[in-house]
Image (cartoon, rainbow, N blue to C red):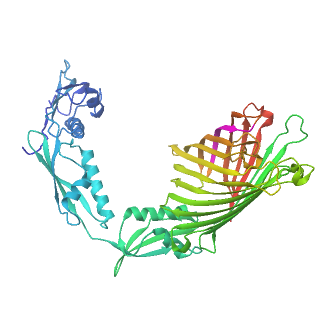
């Protein structure tokens, strides 16, 4: 029997130009679909005129719902019934003969030449006996077109040319294919790059020309360019015809690739202190040296009257023409009058994809105690020991954020494992030789709730394992970039964890207001021991002519309002 949907309409003309008003909807014969679901799709409500066109729309809506539920042979009849005495109103009776649910019996493909028909069947995805629904058919067509695009047929077309079957409900689906022209990309043209070297852009394509046009690879090409942070805009690559075939056009707009990031924080004096403390940070990043994509960063920070830190780093992208980044770094922290923490690091990062990378890392760290911390006897006195630790390990990154500066969706994940040995400095008392191990974990999740509302959930963890952890081995948290509501680097421990739950309301461009709650855990040496704490507060970031200006107000657990910590920040591109 050829599949057909029979539609019957019964209407009664009361007098020229008049139709009964709907009093109520009634259904009969429906078992597979509830009366409530049917009532929801019928576009008639009590008080509406039951015109011929209104009845046709009701039948069409019910029939469409049955088709979505695989009942392609359902017969629907809609007719007024139960008139009022003056025939001005009536009920609408919708009678249904459901039949049997349709299933996929066989799929025939017409016009397939680029690959075997069994591959087309596997791509389409329907199996004999599966329910036959419009949604399933559309998914199958979309999967076919995606496969054709991947093979270099971007102009392929697919459609359902026919459906037929028997009384058992097993249907034969006929799929028509128009493959169109096979397209290969033979060249890539770049427009808009005034500073960035063309080779820097081309290497992000990961394409070996000529090769078949793949929309997925092309989309990832644009995605990688946006993640470089070198351009204010990257257009979607488009195809163009050439005498020899086809090319790919990419339009970019150069951005300011150097950034100044400054922040200052004020913490009110504690009981017994004569004045509050000021912490600060200033960082300069150059992300496109000489237009080659090379990066250099320098940072200075201060979190106490006599505690400050400097950091320097350099990254060489695509070393030796391979998707491998090389990086080196140097940092030195002067911890008040106790010690100097000096580190040299190196990394070799393999870019597996636009969002995933794996790096081999190494670090050499020296703890140099001050003379005062060693005791009056100098190196031979009792006090803090010096040491040298050499570690190596692996770093895994996964970043799907839609924007590095103001993410609205995506996840940013990083984990690091390093292990090695720590040896005492010559003549340092109490320093224990042995192994040392570091574990680090960071995950930031950005969840869009509405167009301008974003939730940021984050969890961070750090752990160092060694025979005798000294002050120079501990991790420090607290302050604007870790546990807000506390002084900078207020807590230290061999095992620390902190997180955030932040609600952002974006008002315009890169400006937003936010409220936050930051929980934290610290495992400190005695007498402090293990403890949980938290900070909370609110802030804003505004886009101005000077750059991005931010201010936040935060309190730690148990703090009175008079101890509110205030942070100011400025990010400016130049």
Q: Residue at x 77, y 41 (%)?
A: 565
The C terminus - image quarter? bottom right
In-image side of 103 versus 238 (left or right): left
- 106 over 560 or under it: above or below: below
Residue 299: which quarter of the image?
bottom right
Residue 129: image quadrant is top left
Q: Is residue 172 above or below residue 268?
A: below
Tell me the residue at 27%/50% (across/down). 138
- Residue 489 in percent (x, y) is at 75, 45
- Relative side of 123 to 351, left or right: left
Q: Would residue 414 appear left or right of 332 to someone viewing this image? A: left
Q: As drawn, which residue projects farthest toward the top?
A: 85
Residue 245 coordinates in the image, percent (x, y): 33, 77
Extreme residue toward the bottom, this view? 243
Magenta region includes residue 54: no
Instruction: Let me know if residue 496 appears in the view.
Output: yes
Answer left or right for 335 relative to 164: right
Frontmost residue, 143 versus 571: 143
Image quarter (top left, top right, bottom left or bottom right) of the N terminus: top left
Point out residue 439 in the picture as x, y percentages from the top left corner.
61, 48
In the picture shown, does residue 371 fall above or below 515? below
Is the stretch drawn in magenta largely helix, strand or loop? strand
> Residue 521 placed where, x, y %?
66, 37
Q: Which residues are magenta?
A: 512-525
Q: Nearer the viewer, residue 28 or 263?
A: 263
Q: Is residue 402 visible?
A: no
Q: Is residue 513 magenta?
A: yes
Who's the residue at 28% across and 30% down the image? 37
């Amino acid at each position: 029997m050829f599949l057909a949907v029979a539609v019957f309409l019964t209407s009664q003309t009361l007098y020229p130009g008049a139709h009964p008003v709907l009093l109520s909807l009634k259904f009969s014969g429906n078992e597979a679909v509830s009366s409530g679901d049917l009532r929801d799709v019928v576009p008639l409500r009590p008080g509406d005129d039951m015109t011929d066109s209104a009845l046709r729309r009701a039948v069409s809506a019910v029939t469409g719902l049955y088709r979505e539920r695989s009942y392609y042979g359902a017969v629907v009849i809609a007719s007024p019934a139960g008139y009022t005495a003056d025939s001005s109103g009536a009920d609408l009776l919708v009678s249904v003969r459901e039949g049997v649910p349709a299933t996929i019996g066989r799929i025939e493909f017409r016009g397939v030449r680029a690959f075997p028909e069994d591959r087309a069947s596997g791509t389409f995805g329907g199996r004999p006996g599966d329910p036959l629904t419009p949604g399933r058919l559309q998914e199958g067509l979309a999967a076919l077109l995606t496969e054709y695009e991947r093979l270099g047929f971007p102009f392929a077309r697919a459609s359902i040319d026919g459906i037929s079957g028997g009384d058992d409900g097993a249907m034969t689906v006929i799929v028509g294919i128009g493959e169109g022209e096979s397209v290969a990309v033979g060249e890539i043209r770049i427009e808009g790059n005034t500073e960035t070297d063309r080779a820097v852009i081309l290497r992000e394509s990961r394409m070996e020309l000529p090769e078949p046009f793949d929309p997925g690879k092309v989309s990832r090409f644009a995605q990688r360019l946006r993640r470089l942070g070198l351009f204010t805009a990257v257009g979607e690559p488009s195809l163009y015809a050439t005498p020899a075939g086809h090319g790919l056009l990419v339009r970019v707009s150069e951005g300011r690739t150097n950034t100044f990031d400054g922040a200052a924080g004020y913490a009110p004096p504690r009981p017994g202190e004569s004045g509050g403390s000021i912490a600060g940070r200033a960082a300069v990043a150059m992300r496109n040296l000489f237009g080659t994509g090379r990066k250099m960063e320098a940072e200075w920070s201060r979190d106490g009257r006599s505690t400050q830190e400097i950091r320097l780093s350099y990254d060489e992208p695509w070393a030796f023409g391979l998707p491998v980044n090389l990086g080196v770094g140097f940092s030195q922290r002067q911890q008040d009058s106790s010690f100097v923490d000096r580190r040299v690091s190196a990394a070799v990062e393999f870019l597996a994809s636009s969002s995933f990378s794996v790096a081999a890392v190494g670090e050499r760290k020296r703890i140099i105690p001050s003379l005062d911390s060693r005791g009056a006897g100098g190196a031979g006195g009792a006090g803090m020991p010096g040491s040298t630790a050499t570690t190596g390990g692996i770093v895994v990154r996964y970043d799907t954020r839609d924007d590095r500066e103001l993410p609205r969706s995506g996840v940013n994940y990083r984990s690091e494992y390093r292990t090695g040995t720590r040896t005492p400095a010559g003549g340092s008392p109490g320093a224990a030789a042995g192994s040392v191990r570091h574990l680090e974990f960071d995950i930031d999740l950005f969840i869009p709730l509405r167009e301008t509302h974003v939730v940021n959930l984050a969890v961070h963890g750090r752990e160092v394992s060694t025979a005798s952890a000294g002050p120079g081995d501990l991790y420090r948290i607290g302050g604007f970039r870790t546990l807000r509501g506390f002084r900078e680097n207020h807590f230290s421990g061999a095992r620390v964890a902190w997180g955030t739950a932040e609600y952002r309301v974006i008002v315009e461009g890169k400006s937003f207001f936010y409220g936050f709650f930051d929980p934290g855990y610290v495992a400190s040496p005695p007498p402090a021991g293990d403890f949980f704490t938290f900070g909370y507060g609110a802030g804003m970031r505004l886009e101005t002519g000077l750059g991005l200006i931010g201010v936040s107000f935060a309190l730690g657990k148990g703090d009175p309002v008079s101890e509110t910590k205030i942070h100011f920040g400025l990010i400016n591109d130049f």
